[in-house]
Amino acid sequence: MKNQKTWVAVILLGTVAVNAGAYLVVRSRKAAPPAPVAEPVAARIPVPPPDVASPP
C-alpha cells in the first residue's frame, strides 16, 4: 500500500509542477497587439428606420 501512495504523490506533484511551468510560460509571452479596426463604430452613419404606413 505504501508504494501506491508514493505513486499517487509523485503523479500529483508532477501534475502541479507541469501546470506551474505551463502557467509561467503563458504568462511570460507578450500579448499580441490588438487588430486594427477598419472603420470606427462612431464614424458609421445611422440608417433611418423605414417608414411604416399608419393604420387605416
Image: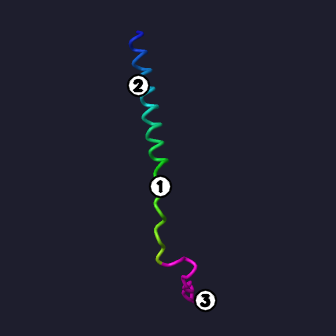
Residue 54: mark in rendering: 3
Q: Which residue is identified by label 2? A: 11
x 47%, y 42%: residue:
23
Q: Amino acid at mark 2?
A: Ile
Q: Which residue is identified by label 1? A: 30
Rate crowding at label 2 as few (under 14), some (14 to 19) or many (20 or more) other CA atoms within 10 Å.
few
User: SS class of the residue under badge 2?
Assistant: helix
* Predominant SS of the magenta segment: loop
x 41%, y 25%: residue:
11
In-front residue for pair 14/50: 14
On screen, residue 21 versus residue 48, left or right, reads left
Q: Nearer the viewer, mark 1 or mark 3?
A: 1
- First along the sequence among labels 2 and 1: 2
Q: How is the image coloured?
A: rainbow
User: SS class of the residue under badge 1?
Assistant: loop
Rendered location of residue 20, percent (x, y): 47, 37
Name the image quarter holding residue 49. bottom right
CA gap, disc 3 to disc 2? 74 Å
Classify 23 as above or below 36: above
User: SS class of the residue under badge 3?
Assistant: loop
- First along the sequence among labels 1 and 3: 1
Q: Which residues are magenta?
A: 39-56
Contact? badges 1 and 3 (CB < 8 Å): no
